[in-house]
Image (tube, rainbow, N blue to C red):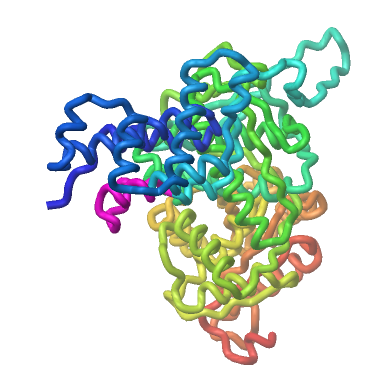
Amino acid sequence: MQQVIPEKIISIRNEIYRDVYNKSEWVYVKLQSLFEIIGRLFLDLSLWDNEFASTDPTGYAIFNYLEHRYIKNPKLANQFAALNEKANIIKHNTDPDRLQTAKFDISFVSFCFNNYNKYTSKLLKPDDRRYWLDLSILSDVTTVVVKPVIDENHVKVQKPAVKFLSSHIESREFEYQIFCGSGKQDYGFKITGLPENPKCSLESASIYATIFGFLLRSINVQKSSYIKDRETRFGKVFDQSKIFRYQIILLLLIRSNYSFDSTLTVFPIDESDLELTIAADSIMDYGAKISELSGVLFTPIKIIINRNGIKISASNDISAEIRTVNFSSRQQDTTRTIWVERTIKYCIKDNDNHYAILEALLYDFFGYEKFKPGQYKALVHMLNYSDSTLCIMPTGGGKSLIYYFLALLQPGPSIIVAPTRVLIADQIRNMRILHQIDDIQTISTNDLYEKGHFSLGHKFIFLTPSDFQHYALIYKVIELNQNRMISGIFLDEIHAISNWSHDFRPDYLMLSFNLLTFADHPRLYGFTATANYRVVKD
């Protein structure tokens, strides 16, 4: 029967992982305690060390005894002595100069992790890694730094300048309405304290806008694979509701140019440092993935937690400068906040790293672990190609998922053109049920005013070819085209555009003329399951 790991070991390991993420020097104290706990565990199981165990030895005495009798590794002994010294300085010293000698050092922590695992292997079963520390934690460069003690003059908090037309005009606070939440009872929230629709000045604005867009794809937000992985490593369940709120707050702060010299200094007054850390790291993880696929320059913004920073709250604390206020019920209007930037040009390579990134995004976006045959190749080709492209794939091969994927990897709304309202309704039903995507807008009315004055409020906008025959909508498309507000236009059942097709539709011919004439900036993507050579050429 396999021995159950004591709860105390699990708990202190989780504290160690948290201290590593926060780059806290208190990790030395936790590591010191873990060495002692493992030593005591060995003595409790040993039949030959009862006499020594009966003396109730201290942690350092336990290590010395076991090292001399069983381990016999002088280097390990020297390393533990250095750890013991740093831990005792942290626990018992208040002299600032002395404390400087025990600052967090990732290299030293790495040595301690390795030596602890060697120590454990010697004392317990060599192949039993249940007690080991996870070394991969050290390879994750966290984007969050906790600096509780710092000279106020050295904390630089960037806030965008606000210009008033008149000193007599009172500034009105803008509210961002986010209708997404974690779970069926989380109805979303508003964010107060930020400027309205600012222009992000960062070179990587397109990457952050893309992340912002796909985080809002569903009113019921799911945990990403990155967050699930962190839960496994920490051995605890995170508050996804707070993480999501912090993700949106941080992205809007970045959009509003609050970051300074690749840093953003904030203070979560609801004391949710861990959730803020996970939120920031997950954003930067997505950013690094998109940067790797696209070649767009991306310098992760380091989040500094400090009392002198911008006070933020994910739990409706009125003392915060930027805070969330929860909705008490589901809102009928689920319009999303739209953040549009320059379209991203991808340059995906045929290697395992890029394949793994797209597979991870496939799981996060749609819940699938593997691509269907042909999907990956088609997706990569359409992402890489800078001109209009055509995808021919059999019915049931997953064409729709490809254009959902293409749209989610761009920083702006996309228009999807389907032949009939019935097909649109079928697409929307599949998006909602199969993929939990509800960031969807339809223009189904015959009201010409509405056709010409609809506002972009969603990632996916569904239209029919007949909609494009209305001059009011064409004028709206011209406006959106000029302002570069559309990331892409997806034409489903594109074979209907050819008079050689078995399903030729005259309104598709007019659609072709209107798109080429009035929407020349967005890329066009065609999809069909039935097209012979003549139709493809046409």
Side of 439 relative to 429 (left or right): right
Name the residue at the right extreme.
166
In the image: residue 202, left or right of residue 461: right
Q: Residue 510: where, in percent of width, then height? A: 71, 70
Residue 179, can we see it? no
In the image, what residue occupies the spot 71% across and 34% down? 263
Q: Quadrant of the C terminus?
A: bottom right
The correct choice, above or below, for 334 with respect to 501 in the image is above
**Residue at the spot x=58%, y=55% of the render?**
408
Residue 407 sits in quarter: bottom right
**The image quarter in which residue 516 lies:** bottom right
Q: What range is drawn magenta here?
A: 118-134
Image height check: is 227 above or below 318?
below
Name the foreground residue: 355 vs 433. 355
What residue occupies the far top of the structure in this picture? Answer: 168
Q: Identify the residue shown where x is 77% and y is 35%.
A: 261
Q: Is residue 127 magenta?
A: yes
Please identify the quarter of the rendering in which residue 164 is found: top right
Residue 101 image point, x, y percent:
61, 27
Q: Residue at x 51, y 45 (%)?
A: 110
Query: 536 or 348, which lies in front?
Result: 348
Residue 440 magenta: no
Number of numbered discs on residues: 0
- Relative placement, left or right, of 239 versus 297 is left
Instruction: Tell whether 31 sits left or right of 204.
Output: left
Residue 329 pos. (x, y %):
41, 27
Q: Is residue 173 visible?
A: yes
- x, y percent for residue 485: 73, 50
